[in-house]
Image (cartoon, coloured by chain):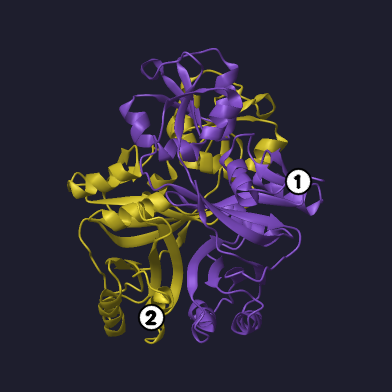
Chain colours: A yellow, B purple
Amino acid sequence: MKKIKIGFQGEKGAYSELAAKRFFSSRNIELIPYKTFADVFHAIAKKKVEAGVVPVENTLNGGIREVFNLLDEQSVFVIGEIKLRISHMLLGIRGAKLSGIRKVYSHPQALLQCRKFIRSAKLVQAEYYDTAGAAKFVASQSDPSIAAIAGQSAAEDYGLAVLKKNIESDGKNFTRFLVISRESVISGDADKSTVVFSLRNQPGALQRVLSVFAIRDIDLLSIDSIPIIGKPWEYKFFVDFRGNIFQEPQAKTIEHLRELCPHVKVVGSYKEGRTAF
Amino acid sequence: MKKIKIGFQGEKGAYSELAAKRFFSSRNIELIPYKTFADVFHAIAKKKVEAGVVPVENTLNGGIREVFNLLDEQSVFVIGEIKLRISHMLLGIRGAKLSGIRKVYSHPQALLQCRKFIRSAKLVQAEYYDTAGAAKFVASQSDPSIAAIAGQSAAEDYGLAVLKKNIESDGKNFTRFLVISRESVISGDADKSTVVFSLRNQPGALQRVLSVFAIRDIDLLSIDSIPIIGKPWEYKFFVDFRGNIFQEPQAKTIEHLRELCPHVKVVGSYKEGRTAF
């Protein structure tokens, strides 16, 4: 049976890879790592992979603007969602001891999420472009005074020892991932949709547009404003709402948005993600 | 005459210092640098300074979540606003030449804003906690192969040569700064207000709250959702709106918000900022 190719950003062992494994669980997939988010989107556009899995929001750090911009600008659609509990671990080479660690490598976001631990252990921190990449680097050195902050699968992939578990400052650390594809596939159980729009430069424009949802009793789940590059103090808005765009009120809402907004893109209708561990 | 003490984040020569100088222009001020945003807020709370100037939004990178959180959590109020055109320069020691530069130091945001230039000049980039701090570091080394990305005032403060001007990828690069103080001072010409609120966990809660502005024809200027730490997938919303809270419809709106929301803080009413260069 042919494997379905799925792209993700980061090295083997990254949280995105784990999210992809959990989302596609029993299906026969091949996971392809890419260096940047843009690379994942381009791989989809160029048909090098069938789909991609990208993080869009973390409960401690908020939305990831680069991914929002790519969702708007690139010809891809959201076809699914999954939430992952992020549990950071301090990883060292075999034989390293927690008390001997002096320097820690990880992605800036992960370092930020573990700042209380890093401060109390008095570690020097060094930024790395990716958590799993940091684990790979530590594994390549035979230095018992350095460690990486990454997840369980990075420990396994690179044969590192877990020196300490759950070192994040706040235990309620989740990341929401979107599954993206070249074609907009809407399954029958899709209960959540995402649309991005820009506003006319008029007083009351935002209220007018939000009323388009309100008059149809469509529940807004979230709203994110993203600066439009090259137009200072103008924004595009990403709105998540209940329902799928094959339902009549939702379809009418989109029509109505197109009437009011200079730019509208339906990013996708999909089943709201469950939380995986 | 006694000088008014104003706190800002960064080293002498930082963009925040320039914003403070432009905002207080002719007044007799003393500018006090602090290492972090939290330090500036604490200095205000402890009466070490009269006021502070902090960036809240950049037109390329969006809102600064750490500042939003501090505005909500700390006992400070916004009393003014100023927008600054950010023009990045490549700075080296006297005698350094553009063609000889190999490595560039700056704040991650500034590196991001100059990524096209850095890529085309094939420079190695190194992150520094502050643009002016990077300039200070370069000035302290006698190495003509390293440079900093910072502003004009950093060049002057540290005696560096301007190797290239306007190296930002997008010329329309502005940062919005807020002037914050221990007490909520509302001047007669205040035409803009900021409020932060959280929502009850109910379908339609966001629409219901936004209707509180709509029914009074109060223009929403922006809306930012910030994750609530410890409550995954719940947000607090920062809303900028037209008018000041001494006006009746605005005062009634705030009363109405307190009825609907578990948490409401009026962050301030102030005069909308002009753009300085």
Label 1 is found on which chain of the structure? B
**Percent coordinates x, y for residue B236 in the rendering:** 58, 66
Q: Which mark is residue B207?
A: none
Q: Which amino acid does label 2 sit on?
A: Phe
Indicate the quadrant where residue B169 lies: top left
Work out how far the residue at label 2 is from the one at label 1, CA to CA, in angstroms.
Answer: 48 Å
Along the horizontal axis of the image, is A74 left or right of B44?
left
Report which residue position mark 1 lands on: B5
The residue at the point 62 percent across, 50 percent down is: B54
Q: Is mark 1 on a helix, strand or loop?
A: strand
In the image, residue B104 sits, relative to residue B60, either above or below, namely above
The residue at the point 56 percent across, 54 percent down is: B82
Indicate the quadrant where residue A144 lies: top right
Label 2 is found on which chain of the structure? A
A228, A154: nearer the viewer: A228
Q: Can residue B125 be seen in this view?
A: yes
In the image, residue B272 sits, relative to residue B188, either above or below, namely above
**Percent coordinates x, y for residue A205 in the rendering:** 39, 75
In the image, residue B138 sits, relative to residue B197, either above or below, namely above
Q: Can residue A104 be seen in this view?
A: no
The residue at the point 46 percent across, 69 percent down is: A222
Along the horizontal axis of the image, is B254 left or right of B171?
right
**Percent coordinates x, y for residue B147 in the rendering:** 48, 23
Q: Residue A213 carries which label?
A: 2
Q: What residue type is labelled 1?
A: Lys
B174, A186: nearer the viewer: B174
**Percent coordinates x, y for residue B185 in the rendering:** 72, 65
Instruction: Count the marks.
Output: 2
Along the horizontal axis of the image, is B125 left or right of B156?
left
Mark 2 and mark 1 in contact? Answer it, CB < 8 Å: no
**Dot 1 surroundings within 10 Å: few (below 14), some, or many (20 or more)?**
some
Q: What element carries label 2?
A: helix
